Image (spheres, rainbow, N blue to C red):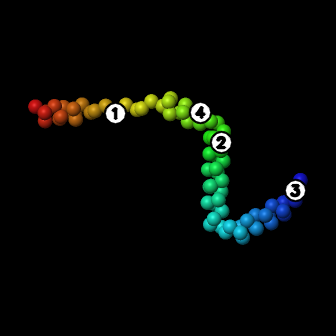
């Protein structure tokens, strides 16, 4: 088991080197990299399955009142 003081020193050094504003950007970039790596390892098959299984949503039905108004205007 490691002594927790080592981790504290490492965190302070990282904070000094990169600054408080840059650390969230670095972590976000690491997260996107890991996500991309996982997608690459899966071969992209999951993305193809998702796109082929989703059906387009049908347009909402027209209101009867609006349809009657259109017919009156056309007449």
Q: Residue at x 55, y 36 (%)?
A: 47
Label 1 to label 2, Cα distance in Å? 38 Å
Q: Is residue 24 above or below residue 57?
A: below
In terms of depth relative to the viewer, which is nearer, 3 or 51?
Answer: 51
Horizontal arrangement in the rendering, residue 54 relative to residue 8 (left or right): left
Q: Quadrant of residue 3?
A: bottom right
- Crowding near pointer 3: few (<14 within 10 Å), some, many (20+)? few
Q: Residues within 10 Å of mark 4 (few under 14, many from 20)?
A: few
Q: CA distance from mark 4 to mark 2?
A: 12 Å
Q: Secondary structure at mark 2?
A: helix
Disc 4 on helix, strand or loop? helix
> Is tag 1's residue or tag 4's residue first in the polypeptide sequence?
4
Of badges 1 and 3, the one in the foreground is 3
**Residue at which label 4 appears:** 45
Q: Position of residue 71 (x, y in %)?
A: 16, 31
Toward which corner of the image does residue 45 lie, by quadrant? Answer: top right
Q: Assess disc 1: are there few (<14), some (14-19) or many (≥20) residues with their C-alpha within 10 Å of its C-alpha.
A: few
Q: Earlier in the sequence, mark 1 or mark 2?
A: 2
Q: Which residue is mark 3?
A: 2
Residue 30 at what x, y percent from top left? 66, 53
Precedes in sequence: disc 4 or disc 3: 3
Q: Residue at x 80, y 66 (%)?
A: 9
Locate residue 20 relative to residue 13 in the image: left or right.
Answer: left
């Amino acid at each position: 088991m490691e002594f927790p003081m080592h981790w504290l020193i490492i965190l302070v050094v990282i904070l000094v080197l990169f600054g408080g504003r840059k650390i969230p950007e670095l972590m976000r970039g690491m997260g996107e990299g890991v996500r991309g790596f996982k997608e690459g390892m899966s071969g992209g098959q999951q993305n193809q399955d998702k796109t082929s299984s989703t059906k387009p949503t049908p347009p909402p039905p027209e209101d009867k009142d609006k349809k009657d108004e259109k017919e009156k205007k056309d007449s």
